[in-house]
Amino acid sequence: MSVFEYAPAPESRSIVDIQPSYGLFIDGEFVDGTGEAFKSVNPATEEVLTEVSAGSEADVDRAVTAARRAFTRVWGPMRPADRGKYLFRIARLLQERAREFAVLESLDNGKPIRESRDVDVPLAAAHFFYYAGWADKLDHAGLGTSPRPLGVAGQVIPWNFPLLMLAWKVAPALAAGNTVVLKPAETTPLSALLFAEVCQQADLPPGVVNIVTGAGETGRAVVEHRDVDKVAFTGSTEVGKSIARAVAGTHKSLTLELGGKAANIVFDDAPIDQAVEGIVQGIFFNQGHVCCAGSRLLVQESIHDEVIASLQRRIGTLRVGDPLDKNTDIGAINSAEQLARIKELSDYGETEGATRWQPACDLPDRGYWFPPTIFTDVSPAHRIAREEVFGPVLSVLTFRTPDEAVAKANNSTYGLSAGIWSEKGSRILKVANQLRAGVVWANTFNKFDPTSPFGGYKQSGYGREGGRHGLTAYLKGADRP
Ligand code: NAD
Ligand code: MN
């Protein structure tokens, strides 16, 4: 693997206290579910961490009823500044318990502790701080004076950023005066259950936040419940489409954050070393389980060989392994299912004629692992250039002119994000304006901030999360009844 030898620097897991089993969090308490129990495993070791309950329709109904009651009697009528105080309290508790959340997230999800510690948890707290500030300023949300909350929000989130996606969903909903029923992903329920404890610790009124664990059927019950006013979903385009069909013709409002196939465009005047860091960060951050990952590298033909050689050298130094080790760059693939999908698409890449490169890399015997991978000789028609791999796999394509770069970047059914690397500001602005992507980064990649709206074009979904835009998705006002 690497030419450097490091001593292992594992984070201690003794800070987390995982119960042998968990119920559902409904109306401020942990209660037994009526559905079957299922296991959550540590994908780095295949160790069973705990058992959680698969919420049934009856459980979801109980949660929605609690959320409705809390909305009508407590949270809706509460003074906005007081709602803000609860959000500030939650934000501070997330900070206080940051190390516990980071270790738990890395155990259940497989992501490197460096990322859960430095990205997921601080950003989750930042979202609560940011939206806490909005709670008593809703008149400035851009929806006229005294905009009103929608009511009960049903929220379904994926496994790639379990706590952060919870924060993206729960913080704006509560700040706007809604109550929520949230379903975490089946492979990563634990940080949401710890968040439920934080709600208790913050004395949040019962029923304002309800957490119902389970798989797709539980998610469907949340989305289709007749007393839910707003549905917010992040996950695959396929499930997003089925949710859009289920919600069509009802009174529910809907926001969808779906997949992506971002182009990361490197022009010949870009600083190569910085661009290489950005390419690595763009595709290998969180094992590539990122909807806005820079999974299509578009490199100008004249610098192709230089960029690839430099990229290969850099990838050779990445450390793949124990997510709890502070030196680890790439952790475990989240599940056996996701690993199978990554393998299938990568093998198909070779079948279609692309060239696979992987560094020499010792992978642990147990757990789900995939080495950092780049494909060259990729054509825009290949599946690895079109479909979301959602793993540490980069497809490299080339272009000659800026127009060709824009055309190739936009040649996608997705439009979530993009990156541009160039020394020329004028070129960056010109290209950015032509890209059909919700977020465009210039000379950087995968930068997130709660003040900045995030969302897609085309099959990447609709609606925005983050910033003022994210708040309005949970409000109705004079110009949006
Ligand atoms: P998924 O869309 O099936 O799961 C996301 C969430 O939706 C989970 O909580 C799941 O339980 C729930 N769900 C599943 N079916 C549902 C239904 N009919 N109604 C309501 N909720 C439902 O995603 P996945 O199977 O975990 O991953 C498949 C692919 O999706 C990945 O390979 C990746 O390409 C993509 N993905 C994208 C994102 C993203 O952030 N955009 C996140 C996860 C996965
Ligand atoms: Mn897990």
Image: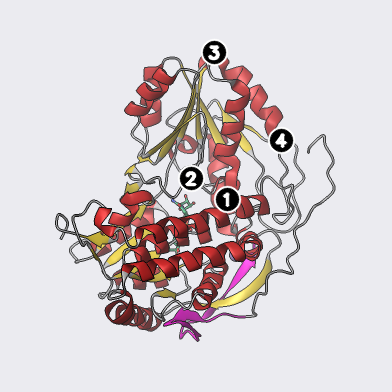
Mark 4 and mark 1 lie on one chain; the one further toward the N terminus is 1
Numbered range of the magenta stretch: 21-42
Q: Earlier in the sequence, mark 1 or mark 3?
A: 1
Tag shown at residue 359: 4
Q: For mark 2, what is the residue?
A: 448
* Nearer-N-terminus badge (3/2): 3
Asked if disc 4 and disc 2 are in contact, CB closer than 8 Å, the reply is no
The structure residue drawn at horizontal position 36% and vertical position 25%, both measured from the top left corner, is 407
Label 4 packing within 10 angstroms: few (<14), some (14-19), many (20+): some
Real-space Cα separation, disc 3 to disc 4, in angstroms: 24 Å
Three-letter code for the amino acid on which mark 2 is drawn: Phe
Query: Looking at the image, in which quadrant does ligand 2 appear?
Result: bottom right
Residue designated by label 1? 119
Calculate the distance from the C-alpha at mark 1 to the C-alpha at mark 3: 35 Å
Are the residues flagged by discs 2 and 1 in contact, CB closer than 8 Å?
yes
Up the image or down, 126 lies above or below 33; here it is above
Name the quarter where the N terminus is drawn: top right
The amino acid type, in three-letter code, at marker 4 is: Pro
Residue 442 in the image: above or below residue 204: above
Query: Which structural element holds mark 3?
Result: helix
Q: Earlier in the sequence, mark 2 or mark 1?
A: 1
Q: Residue at x 67, y 74 (%)?
A: 17
User: In the structure shown, which secondary structural element does the residue marked by tag 1 occupy?
Assistant: helix
